[in-house]
Image: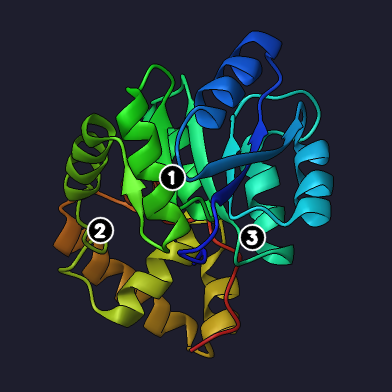
Amino acid sequence: MTSAAGPIRVLIADDHPVVRRGMSALLASLDGVEVVAEATTGEEALREAQLTRPDVVVMDIQMPGMDGVEATQRLAAVLPDVAVLVVTMFEDDETVVSAMRAGARGYLLKGAEQEEILTTIRSVAAGQFVMAPGVAARIIGHLGSVPAPAAPPFPELTGRELEVLDRVARGHSNARVAADLALASKTVANHLSAIFSKLGVSGRTEAVILARERGLGEATPGSGP
């Protein structure tokens, strides 16, 4: 958190000269903000941040070489007290989530009003987390709509029957299945009969097709029971 007696020191990282200079001029005109450095790449942002120790880095996402997401991640590792505020034109969910996971404390879209930019810079400098309202609402909705984990396949089968079916779906013979699971071949045959009956299939081929459709037969073979 910055001292109340001094201005918030800001580094601007953006590869577009017009955007960078415009942001610099805007921030320089605001009370309580001092632009201490500019950068055009992620590498420059890291170097300048270590040299000038700003309170906030205003970070673009798309830059040549190291992009803003990677630069944010590295900056969080070497200068964890420096707040990164992403200001970009990209508002897709993947970009937003990537930036937040990298350690950004704020996310604004280019074109935000002057007062919103200043308020957000002050907030992230004070340790708060801020996101553009429209982006925040969509991301929260997106996270809330994540489907529940899929139920395990074939709940009607016992654990042992599922193991047998999985190995059969990998193309293993009854003898191989028996060896893998330390069972008698007759026991494997009995399990298969029960599996065919429970799944309502006529034999091995149909069982394998059904099993593979449900994701079995793809894992690395286990070591046994």
Q: How far apart are marks 2 and 1 (CA)?
A: 38 Å
The numbered mark, 2 or 3, whose residue comes first in the sequence reads 3
Look at label 1 and name its amino acid.
Ile
Q: Nearer the viewer, residue 5 or 92?
A: 5
Q: Nearer the viewer, residue 224 or 219?
A: 219
The answer to whether residue 3 is above or below residue 29 is below
Q: Which of 139 and 160 is in front in this view?
A: 139
Left-right relation of 113 to 46:
left
The numbered mark, 3 or 1, whose residue comes first in the sequence reads 3
Q: Nearer the viewer, mark 3 or mark 1?
A: 1
- Residue for badge 2: 149
Q: How far apart are marks 2 and 3 (CA)?
A: 32 Å
The answer to whether residue 32 is above or below residue 92 is below
x and y percentages locating residue 224 in the rendered image: 54, 85
- Residue for badge 3: 76
Look at label 2 and name its amino acid.
Pro
- Residue for badge 1: 121
Using a 10 Å C-alpha cutoff, classify the residue at mark 1 as few (fewer than 14 neighbours), some (14 to 19) or many (20 or more).
Answer: many
